[in-house]
Image (cartoon, helix red, strand yellow):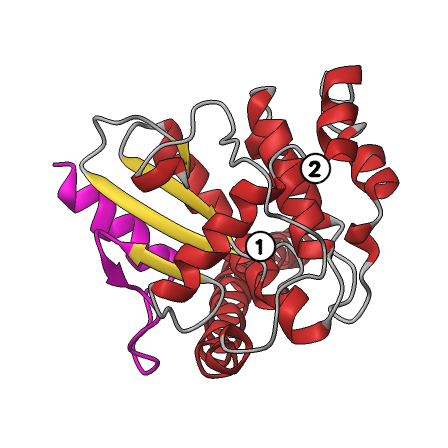
Amino acid sequence: MPPRFVCPDVSEKNREGKQSARERIAVERERQKARDKRRRVMLVSAAVVGVLALAAVIGVLAANAGDDDKKDTSGPVVAPKGASGDDKLSIPLGKDTAKSRLTIWEDFRCPACKQFEVGYSPTINDLADKGQLKVEYHLATLIDGNMGGSGSLHAANAAACAQDAGKFAPYHDELFKNQPPEPDDAFADNGKLIDLAGKVDGLATTTFKKCVNDGKHDSWVAKSQEAFQKAKLRGTPTVLLDGKDIFADQQNPVTPQKLKAMVEKANQ
């Protein structure tokens, strides 16, 4: 009897080949997704750092611009609850035991400040929540002087009123999320500031509204702006990590990733 040959199951091999190809394609797609995600993160970080580096130059001009506001801020200086530092001009976030300290000078009308918050606040908040970073917020009103209007002053006063209520951090974030275009003095409208408080659970109380409408902390805000000018800072945002300006070296600024690594190393 002649030898019997068994034909290979071509269809089965084809199925195995197709399945293997699909698996390889799926794996490659996942790898590509991961590469794309890393690329997006790098591009966003680079864009934020680029905007902030530019702000380091532009901010010098803005910091030396005209009068901040025509509104009378000569009344008694009333610091918000929990304010700390020299003359109680900073609003703290995080634990005093943290080994690293981040000082942030911001203006709620400042577009570069918003870019900074978008790019860095998730890292900053995470480090503060972990007890590794103490943050000191200082509020400035230089855009009022540069562009005219009083939105920086009104927004800063409202943020101080939110601090009185223990709601500074979430209200601070809402102000930047809803920041109007720089020439638009929308934050001069106390009604808008009170409306935004409605986005923060438990903030839009009668006490908060009165604080905003009365300009309770206007003189405190003016004193903070005076301290900003006396310090001869380059503009907003000015961000100091343990006293060192993280954007001073425009060729090698501190990215969110570098900031995290530096703080975590200090806390080891």
Q: Name the element at disc 1.
A: helix
Q: Earlier in the sequence, mark 2 or mark 1?
A: 1
The residues tagged by marks 2 and 1 sit, at their Cα atoms, a distance apart of: 28 Å
Q: Quadrant of the rendered structure where residue 127 is?
A: top left
Q: Position of residue 112 (x, y in %)?
A: 57, 67
Q: Quadrant of the rendered structure where residue 263 is?
A: top left
Taking 183 as reference, is 143 left or right? left
Of residues 232 and 105, which is closer to you in this image? 232
Residue shown at 39%/28% (left/top)? 129
Residue shown at 63%/29% (left/top)? 161
Residue 261 covered by magenta stretch: yes
Q: Amino acid at mark 2?
A: Gly
Q: Position of residue 59 (x, y in %)?
A: 50, 76
* Quarter placement of the C terminus: top left
Q: Which mark is residue 57?
A: none
Q: Position of residue 130 (x, y in %)?
A: 33, 28
- Of labels 2 and 1, the one closer to you: 2
Q: Which mark is residue 215?
A: 2
Say if residue 1 shows up in the picture. Answer: no
Residue 144 covered by magenta stretch: no
Say if residue 170 shows up in the picture. Answer: yes
Residue shown at 25%/51% (left/top)? 261
Q: Name the element at disc 2.
A: loop
Taking 181 as reference, is 47 left or right? left
Stretch of the chain drawn in magenta: 241-268
Q: Which mark is residue 118?
A: 1
